[in-house]
Image (cartoon, rainbow, N blue to C red):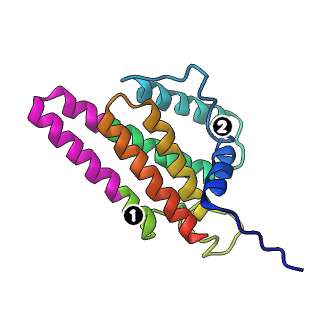
Amino acid sequence: MNDTTFISREKFISFANQFSNIYNPNPDDPEPSGPWGPVIRKAFQFSKLSWVMLNPQPLPPREKIALNIAREVIDQALLMQQIGNSLNQEGEERGIIIVSGFISSFIDDCGNGIIKIKIPHRGIPEPGPDPVLTPVELIIMGLQFQSEAKSADNEQIQRLFMDAGKKLISGGIDKL
């Protein structure tokens, strides 16, 4: 009996989008947006950390950590873009170039194994689980970039985030 099933890329991405909804809030919810969105989100994440410190729970799954890594990279890219926008026209153009290089570097580092998720496991002898990003983690990060692209104010940032999402998703699918 053959237990292998083949699905198209489109169906798999559709499945992954549904899977990522476990980690992403409902887009219809009034999530912080605009220039202060990253600041509010970071404050909210810190408050979640405070709750965990009061009532320690197991570490979040690697997929959630991958999602938070993508969110942090997105927040930093948006901050870079905001700084570029506050400068003259030439500074704004350079800001987009800097953001593009930052995101490209992140994607390259995800694909070549530089970015790793190493969760310390007590009682498990080293080396422990492989810290290299898994295909699912790459896809989740790609979906996060695409989700954030829809809410970005700047068209160039939207394109950068969509392209980054596509590259991460394709990299994840290729590793399956």
Q: Position of residue 120 (x, y in %)?
A: 61, 61
Q: Main secondary structure of the magenta part?
A: helix
Q: Position of residue 161 (x, y in %)?
A: 40, 44
Measure how far apart labels 2 and 1 are at the Cα level.
Answer: 30 Å
Tell me which amino acid carries mark 1.
Asp
Q: Which residue is mark 1?
A: 109
Rendered-image quadrant of the C terminus = bottom right
What's the magenta region? Answer: 79-105
Mark carried by residue 52: 2
First of labels 2, 1 by sequence position = 2
Q: Badge 1 local density, few (<14 within 10 Å), some, or many (20+)?
A: few
Residue that extends furthest to the top in the rendered view of this protein:
30
Q: Is residue 59 visible?
A: no
Q: Is residue 17 above or below residue 115?
A: above
Q: Is residue 60 above or below residue 90?
A: below
Mark carried by residue 34: none
Q: Position of residue 31 (x, y in %)?
A: 54, 23
